[in-house]
Amino acid sequence: MLVNIIDRIRLPFRKDKELYSSLYNIIGFYPHNISYYKLALMHKSVMHRNKKGKPANNERLEFLGDAILDAAVGDIVYRHFPGKREGFLTNTRSKLVQRDTLNKLAQELGLCELILSSGHTSSHNSYMAGNAFEALVGAMYLDRGYDACMTFLKKRILAQMINIDKVAYKEVNFKSKLIEWSQKNRVKISFQLLEESKDQNGSPTFNYQVMLEGIAGCSGAGFSKKESQQKACKDTLDKLRREPQFIDEVFAAKGSRTKMEEEPVEALPSTDAPQDFIVVSETDINDDEKHPTAFREEVFSEAESAADNDQEQQSEHLDETDEDYDLSHISAKEKSREEIIAAAEHAAFEEE
């Protein structure tokens, strides 16, 4: 029966029979236009050109397939988890279409064996396989339409290869998980770029290291910053769980930092109001020469008080004999008119 179906397709070349059969095992149906699928399996390293001389590879189909995957998987996740919020749905879709997931699917489906490449890209298979899967979805969309893509994802991928519930509740964002832990424990975290280079095929590579309170964690290498940091965070989380001395070192560094931040670096400012509005003359420099105020109080010893009393008594005696301070003519007793006249005449006769 399979031979009859292949004969009805009228393959242009005998060698395409094997490709048709392989694609049927992968996607579950026979292609109408095999050229789309050939292009989807052609890596850019082949440097193939079409009749017009333009490069022919799977990059454009990869772009289209990426958009179709987002829409189709978003539809599936939305219907599978009724009542879930937007953040949960977005996170689940991201897990299903992320590079690691697509790469694993391409390997399990046997798609990697059909990819045409220069043969020197084995170190970069994490990109090549996932890109080919997206390009395959793009080819299916052009060949059979959106419904064929949905059927492939539902019946072939989700029904047989992926447990969508397990994926949805599984934590795969190790960077987010490590950052959340550091924020809860108030630990400073940063990512240090150790090396940025290119592999033998010219593909960029990155090597990042996690730093916790200045203490070096684990490092990770990948073909993107995100991939490198994810690996570094995953290994650092494992190290925190396995090595108590490492986490002790991190928290000791945190304690030293917080202690330095809490200690004052200079003397506290005074709260006294400035007195620079008072002009001080040279004669006011000596406190003994300043004028006493009415509110100034002095404390004397008993000897000093006795001396002061003697001095006051002597002053009073001098006052009584001093003519300049004779106050005998002043009296509070009321005098008659005759007494006043007599006193005046007596004073007049004494001056003569």
Image (spheres, rainbow, N blue to C red):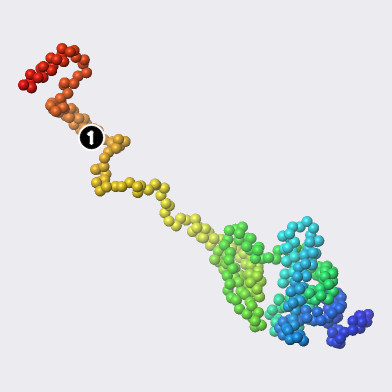
Front residue (pair 260, 202): 202
Quadrant hosting residue 313:
top left
On the picture, is 132 further left or further right than 175? right
On the picture, is 73 further left or further right than 232? right
Q: Residues within 10 Å of mark 1 (few under 14, many from 20)?
A: few
Quarter holding the N terminus is bottom right
Q: Position of residue 267 (x, y in %)?
A: 42, 54
Quadrant hosting residue 35:
bottom right
Question: Residue sitting at 79 percent across and 74 percent down?
Answer: 137
The reply to whether residue 46 is in sight is no
Question: Looking at the picture, which amino acid does disc 1 mark?
Answer: Glu
Tell me how many marks there are.
1
Q: Position of residue 23 (x, y in %)?
A: 83, 78
Q: Dot 1 corresponds to which residue?
A: 304
Question: Residue sitting at 63 percent across and 60 percent down?
Answer: 181
On the picture, is 289 further left or further right than 229? left
Question: Residue sitting at 71 percent across and 76 percent down?
Answer: 127
Query: Is 55 rendered above or below residue 290?
Result: below
Q: Position of residue 321 (x, y in %)?
A: 13, 26
Question: Residue sitting at 63 percent across and 74 percent down?
Answer: 221
The reply to whether residue 194 is in sight is yes
Q: Position of residue 107 (x, y in %)?
A: 77, 76
Q: Secondary structure at mark 1?
A: helix
Quarter holding the C terminus is top left
Front residue (pair 66, 177): 66
Front residue (pair 299, 83): 83
Quadrant hosting residue 97:
bottom right
Query: Is 288 rendered above or below residue 163?
Result: above
